[in-house]
Amino acid sequence: MAFNKLMALSKRNASLKPLLILLYLLVVALLIALLVSEHQGDKPPFSLSHASAEKEQTPAVVSIYGAGFHSDIRVVMAENLVNEEALIWQQLDGISAKAIDVKNDLALVACYEKKIVSIDLHGGKNPKILGSLDLPGSVRQIKIVGDQALVGMQRHEGFYLIDLKDPKALKLGRHISGSGLVSSMVADRNIVYLTDVFQGVGRIDLSVKNPVLEILASIESPWRIALQGNRLAVGTLKGRVYLFEIIQDGQLLETGSLDFPANVRGIAFVDETLAVTVADDKLHLFNLSSWPVLNNPTQLTLPGNPLLLERIPGQASLAVSLIASGMALIDVAQPTAPVLSGELRKPKTFIGMKLQPESFLESVRMDWRCSPSIKSLGVNTRCWQQRP
């Protein structure tokens, strides 16, 4: 009985043997095919022997010779198709900028948190990137002073000096210690006055060999600063504006203060007028003829909630950055009757804004992102939507 079962099993295995051999051959063939395919994938579809350029032709062409394609194929040279400047701008597209400063035709913009980019504005037309520099920390504020720039960093990171003698090759200079958070800076020749949210009002004298931060006035939550001659005004996040006079040796003498119902967003001097914006839709204008006792301000309702306030140099005009609404232009030639003279309506918030006059027409240079839109930094005020 056992012998019969063994014979039956032997006959069954014999009938499966051809199928097993066929399966084995198929597996071997598949492995060979995969190896060949992988080997061929490492080879280029053609081999290049040499190429010759014929630049005297327009457009310039290059002839490529080799194996695997027709030897008379010609292609247009890539240099005639690639806009290198556009590629550079594209690298910065969509990158937020926290700080910007402009002097003459040179702009310094903080991008990627720790990178400073130098830009030649060419009078507001076709700006060109010159160079860049990576800093050890996050940039908060920038102020160009002569052939150098003072860069205020995030809290506890202090300041750095940048050598601007060659804007195409920015050089990192001395570090200046500081433990606060810089929110705004103004310059009087080689002296920079600044607001430190946690420490008060300070100054740094860049004319000395080893500049240091000196705190001049300990006030609570200073946010914005404005300078006119020996007058210094500081607005705080507590809704107060402090008025100072700069006396001997650059020290500050407090001469008065102004109280507001909300935190101060912007502050600027325009001739004999002090302009203040707070966290509402009002612009407050004070006549400086009674300095330091300033009373009975003129008010103007703005078309939005203000964020920044800057004077247009050479004009009795102000530019106001509006939260998510663009910008507004205010004519304060008659401080008792200010006029909303124009608007730049955009669903954007300009978190950085610098203004500078052009040769004949006043323009506003502004930037809220390091992007191709920086090419429109020169905005002719006559092109803004005019108000009657």
Image: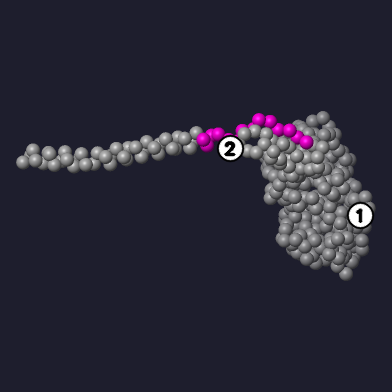
- Whether residue 120 is visible here, answered yes or no, is yes
Are discs 2 and 1 less than 8 Å apart at CB? no
Q: Residue furthest left?
A: 1
Please, what secondary structure does the residue beneath circle 1 have? loop
> Which residue is farthest bottom?
388
Query: Based on the displayed image, in which of its 4 quarters is residue 211 positioned?
Result: top right
Q: Is residue 71 left or right of residue 256?
A: left
The answer to which quarter of the image holds residue 29 is top left
Instruction: Work out whether 164 lies above or below 355.
Output: above
Camera-side residue: 275 or 62?
62
Residue type at mark 1 is Leu
> Magenta span has 225?
no
**Point 9% across, 40% down: residue:** 4
Q: How is the image coloured?
A: one colour
- Give the quarter of the figure containing the C terminus: bottom right
Residue 115 lies, in percent from the top left, at 71, 40
Residue position marked by numbered label 2 in the rendering: 45
Depth-wise, is mark 2 or mark 1 nearer the camera? Answer: 2
Which residue position is annotated with label 1?
361
Residue 198 on image: x %, y % = 70, 46
Please name the amino acid that badge 2 sits on.
Pro
Look at the image and say whether residue 49 sits in the magenta stretch: yes
Span shown in magenta: 40-54
**What is the spatial separation of the Cα atoms under label 2 and label 1, in whole angstroms?**
59 Å
Mark 2 lies on a secondary structure that is loop
User: Where residue 48 sits: x, y (%)?
Assistant: 64, 32
